Image: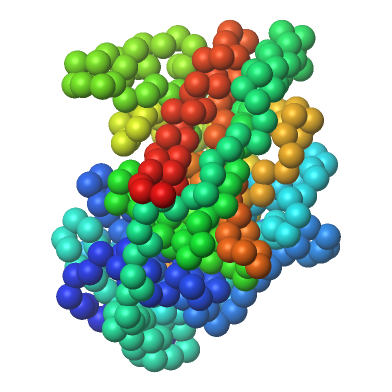
Amino acid sequence: MHAPVILQSEWREPASILAGLAHEDYCVGLISDGSVERGRWSYVAARPDEILSVDPEEGLDPFAALSVLIGSSLGMDPAIDPDLPPFQGGVIGLATYELGARSEPVTLARSQGWPDMVCARYCGLLAFDHHNQRLFAVGCGSNPQKAADMASSWLALPRPSAFEGRLAQGFDAAATNSDYEVNVARVVEKIEAGEIFQANIAQAWQGRLRSGATPADLIERLIAASPAPFAGYVKLPGRAVVSNSPERFIRIQAGTPRLAQTRPIKGTRPRGIDAPSDQAMAETLRASIKDRAENLMIVDLMRNDLARVCVPGTVRTPQLFEVETFTNVHHLVSTVVGELIVGVDAGEVLRATYPPGSISGAPKVQAMRVISQLEPPRGPYCGVLFWAGFDGGFDSSVLIRTVALVQDAEGWLFEVRAGAGIVADSDPASERLETEDKISAIRAALSEGEP
């Protein structure tokens, strides 16, 4: 593989460039909140040179296929210069929650129309350095100059007019409050019976975008009003995913040694109405025995998952129970790291850790079985959005705070879900209110504005 070509251009916000490409199938935006350290880089990519889509009925091994797609162009030196983009070309992909039926011994009904995994190889992309206000057009592959020139050309695309007013015609719960609370109570009974320790149970809201509104309008409003470290946009034929996720799933550091990191979220409080009440909410979360226990269960689960692909004795937890603050909620976050065994690639790491423990439960397999009894197929919700570089680097987010959209003759239908980790002392009404806190930014982006 030739060395990548990296061209610097005048700074532009990623949303302004994404808007001009967002109607194209396989356009992707990975949009970070530049105000936080891990939100330094955003990416916009389009016009891939190869696409891999693994449907539920296919016998193809998606993890091995992903490894082949990445490995078919491996050979680029690790991007070790901290002033250059960590992702300089490779694969960007979307995995639905039901991909977990291919990594764990569990049977899951599939979400109609969504592939288990869809990913594409991008040799041209735009990289945005929020911390230094720099914009790069990156090209790699067999003709890196051509790919970089293609990415540069996107800067001249006209930006469509923004949709004005309310985006959604409706925002309606798919089930009643009591239905969700009954499901929570059922999970508590299963915990008391010793079947599981914890399970993440979600509820859904549905609606339709107003005529003329698009998924691109939604992502632009979300990242303006409620920035998140792992916001994302994926346009597929007749479908789209818009995510405002705060949660990293797996990150792999390129180079030697290759370190894997995961940062599970468990524990939530709403923001306060003023500074003193907001601080009180954060401190209550930090001190909560229930939330710390819930978080620790998933930390142990993720330590076990990473240990499958890491050098024995290297998996550790450098940070436990950190409170991180976002636009509408506080979260309790821990960090688990380990050194990958030599030769293990991103596909193998996904196989070992999928689906994320924070949105399944413990023990993972039995929690997945319980979830399948209480929820319809999740599709993109609680799946993963990821990039995998040709240099061996990898990063991914858990698709929480995520909207799945399907296009029909009249426009775009959408579904949003939010879940809560249910443990032995969970209160059904409190868990329901937690899901509503989590969904508030998306509800506002869809529902606020003049009709």
Q: Residue at x 36, y 73 (%)?
A: 160
Name which quarter of the figure residue 117 lies in: bottom right
Viewer-side residue, 377 vs 192 = 377
Viewer-side residue, 293 vs 422 = 422
Q: Residue at x 30, y 59 (%)?
A: 41
Name which quarter of the figure residue 59 lies in: bottom right
Q: Position of residue 57 (x, y in %)?
A: 83, 60
Q: Residue at x 50, y 21 (%)?
A: 433
Q: Position of residue 176 (x, y in %)?
A: 65, 26
Q: Is residue 141 above or below residue 279?
A: below
Left or right of 205? Residue 124 is left
- The mark total stands at 0
Q: Is residue 348 visible?
A: yes
Left or right of 194? Residue 304 is left
Left or right of 40? Residue 100 is right
Image color mode: rainbow
Q: Residue at x 22, y 58 (%)?
A: 130
Q: Which residue is farthest front?
A: 451
Q: Is residue 31 visible?
A: no
Q: Position of residue 392 (x, y in %)?
A: 47, 63
Viewer-side residue, 95 vs 64 = 95
Q: Position of residue 14 (x, y in %)?
A: 31, 65
Q: Is residue 325 above or below residue 196?
A: below
Name which quarter of the figure residue 367 lies in: top right
